[in-house]
Image (cartoon, rainbow, N blue to C red):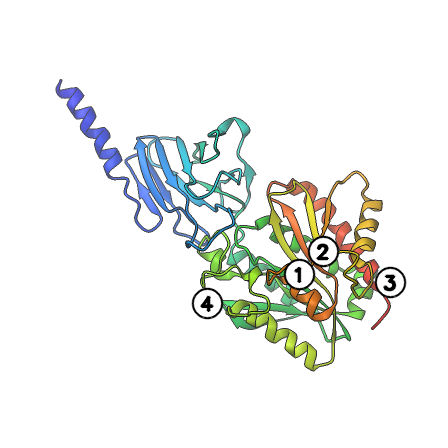
Amino acid sequence: MIRRILLITFAACLISTAVAEDRFCQNELFTIDARYDAGAFAKCKFKSEDMVELTIKPEDHKVVVEQPWFSFKITAKTADTIHVRLKFPSAYARYWPKLSTDGVTWQRAADEAVSTSRNEKKMDVVVEVAPAGTWVSAQELITQSYYDTWLAELSAHEEITVATIGVSTEGRPIQLAKTANKPEVILLLGRQHPAEVPGALAMRDFMNIVLGDSELGREFRDRFTLLIVPLMNPDGVANGHWRHNAGRTDLNRDWGPFKQPETRAIAKLMAGIDELGLQPRLMLDFHATKYTDSILFYTQTEEDVTNPVSFATNWLTSVAERIPDYSFKHDPRPVSEQPNTKGYFFVRYGIPSFTYEIGDEADREQLHAVTPVFAEEMMRVMLQAERP
């Protein structure tokens, strides 16, 4: 009887010590820690010694798009397997967990280790915890350190200068990588929505080709000014947000109103381009989506005449001819009443304006293989366009 009472008391202690404080909780066996850039969960409760329940909630009540970001590190004290239950009270289990033992190299959790409830409000993940700990995230961790490394690489490029063009709501820099002024301008934007990591991966692969030492790349850069803003929403990324910046705003709904400092930084940049008499010719905005497992392009319709004319059709047709076995989607849409990036740049400048969407679960190796084709054909088609 005494032994039974001791066991009950011990089990109660395991649960009672598991109080979440500032993205952290622990019991006698495990530590759950999200105190790092992009780390996120709302509540943590140990249900037993080897089962923890994490509640995933959006950053604020204004979030309407279900992008339930989660990220945490599990450290084992005396055990090596834990059962994690993720609860999504205001969303569903959209993202398949990604695992890492070093925070850099990631792999998709095994099918047999993950199960979801019928209504997708709960996801159970069995995690084998590595000796140094295991990270569990909705997507790979692509945080400020990743962008710092990339921007340092861009800065070392002989044709590129890197500058801070504004600061976020919380004071983080909005940084621009830019080539020398030429009469025509290409604008490339990334990471307006924090959870949309696949778009960030594709953007870097895309830019590696555009900035490469090929004859095509050099000819392209001789004609066009490149304006590259890899990280539009540094606060949202750092804080593990689903969609908004620190100003509780979807940045991709603030083009025209320009109420947020992040979008105002781009508006000021483009005002400077206008003053110099340079002509914007193309805008690409990199995102991620649940609506495909490959790539999806939102563009203007054929009735919305762009300059260059029919650029979207010409570009994507040339890609399809080069990689006929790769299936991607093109969804032309009329200008929306939403003040989004694509609509703003088309209406303001009459240029082809793309939302370049990568599927949440797009195969990363395949994406790495096909993105150079999209970059090369973009350059070829742009070079064929008549000068303004």
Q: Residue furthest left?
A: 2
Query: In what element is the residue under mark 2?
Result: strand
Q: Gap between marks 3 and 4, in whole Å?
A: 41 Å
Q: Gap between marks 2 and 4, in whole Å?
A: 30 Å
Q: Is residue 77 left or right of residue 159?
A: left
- The answer to whether the residue labelled 3 contacts the one labelled 2, judged by CB atoms less than 8 Å apart, is no
Residue carrying label 2: 299
Residue carrying label 1: 342
Q: Nearer the viewer, residue 300 or 216?
A: 300
Residue drawn 42% across the image and 37% down it = 86
Q: Gap between marks 1 and 4, in whole Å?
A: 23 Å
Residue 108 visible in rendering: yes
Q: Gap between marks 1 and 2, in whole Å?
A: 7 Å
Q: In terms of sequence position, does the residue under pointer 3 or pointer 2 come before the other?
A: 2
- The answer to whether the residue labelled 2 contacts the one labelled 4, judged by CB atoms less than 8 Å apart, is no
- The answer to whether the residue labelled 1 contacts the one labelled 2, judged by CB atoms less than 8 Å apart, is yes
Q: Is residue 305 above or below residue 64?
A: below
Residue carrying label 4: 169
